Amino acid sequence: MRDHDSVRRSYDSVAEEYTARMHDELAGKPLDRALLASLLEQTEPGAGIADLGCGPGHVAAWLAEQGASAVGIDLSAAMVEAGSRRFPQVEFRQGDLLELPAKDGEFGSVVAFYTIIHLDPADLRRAFEEAARVLRPSGLALFAFHAGEEIRHLDEWWGHEVDLDFRFFEPARIADLLEAAGFTVEMRMERAHYAHEVDTRRAYLLARRGTAA
């Protein structure tokens, strides 16, 4: 779990700065908002939506503003604390993508924006199986990640010492792993980065959990 420990410590160290800089990030991402609105429209009425690897919870907060019951889950206790202060309309939980703090079938949909990028490739399928576990039958999962095959490492971020790998994944590989975890991939999309974003190719996959128990 060394990698997870370094991710936790790194995000703990940048939590306050990250929250200050990124709390309204979606304001400059019209395609992301459109995809989230589509997810919300297709979510079973009354069912909650989990934001996996939520950071300070800005995505969950946007969903809550649209009327969703949103739950943010993040590995970093400092992120959870910072998010809870800024976005009281969101329920926050600290937890790992490989062992989510949620009941079986608790959510109608899950969102994971730039979350799997910190996972070892060997852990991806387990993470997807956990996402499937906490979803209701036919629930939806929306993933966003950097497309490619490289790894970018950070030792310093906004003046804070960190130890973070950002892993890029080819969409076809992620789609195959989602299918193996019991999902059916319904949408694949890529876009160029916005001017204010890091220069990477952005990938989105929308997948639906199977109906079998």
Image (cartoon, rainbow, N blue to C red):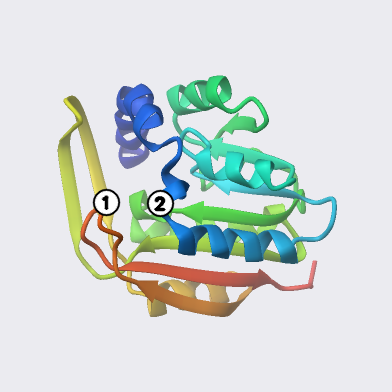
Q: Position of residue 188 (x, y in %)?
A: 48, 78
Amino acid type, mark 2? Gly
Quadrant assignment for the N terminus:
top left
Q: Secondary structure at mark 2?
A: helix
| Whether residue 194 is situated above or below residue 184 in the rendered picture | above
Residue bearing mark 1: 196
Q: Nearer the viewer, residue 181 or 197?
A: 197
Amino acid type, mark 1? His
Q: Secondary structure at mark 1?
A: loop
Farthest residue toward the right?
A: 46
Count residues near mark 2 (Cα–Cα under 10 Å), then give few for <14, some for 14-19, many for 20+. Answer: few
* Image side of residue 148 versus residue 204, left or right: left
Quadrant assignment for the C terminus:
bottom right
Residue found 38% across the figure and 61% down from its top: 145
Residue found 18% across the figure and 53% down from its top: 152
Q: Position of residue 176 (x, y in %)?
A: 47, 78
Q: Position of residue 12 (x, y in %)?
A: 36, 25
| Whether residue 105 is situated above or below residue 141 in the rendered picture | above
Q: Nearer the viewer, residue 83 or 52?
A: 83
Measured in 3D between alpha carbons, the distance from the residue under mark 2 to the one under mark 1, in whole angstroms, is 8 Å
Residue found 55% across the figure and 19% down from its top: 85
For residue 99, which quarter of the picture?
top right
Q: Position of residue 60 (x, y in %)?
A: 59, 42
Residue bearing mark 2: 28
Residue found 51% across the figure and 46% down from its top: 97
Chain-order first, disc 2 or disc 1: 2
* Image side of residue 116 versus residue 64, left or right: left
Count residues near mark 1 (Cα–Cα under 10 Å), then give few for <14, some for 14-19, many for 20+. Answer: few
Q: Nearer the viewer, residue 65 or 11?
A: 65
| Whether residue 187 is situated above or below residue 213 in the rendered picture | below
Q: Are marks 2 and 1 in contact (CB under 8 Å)?
A: yes
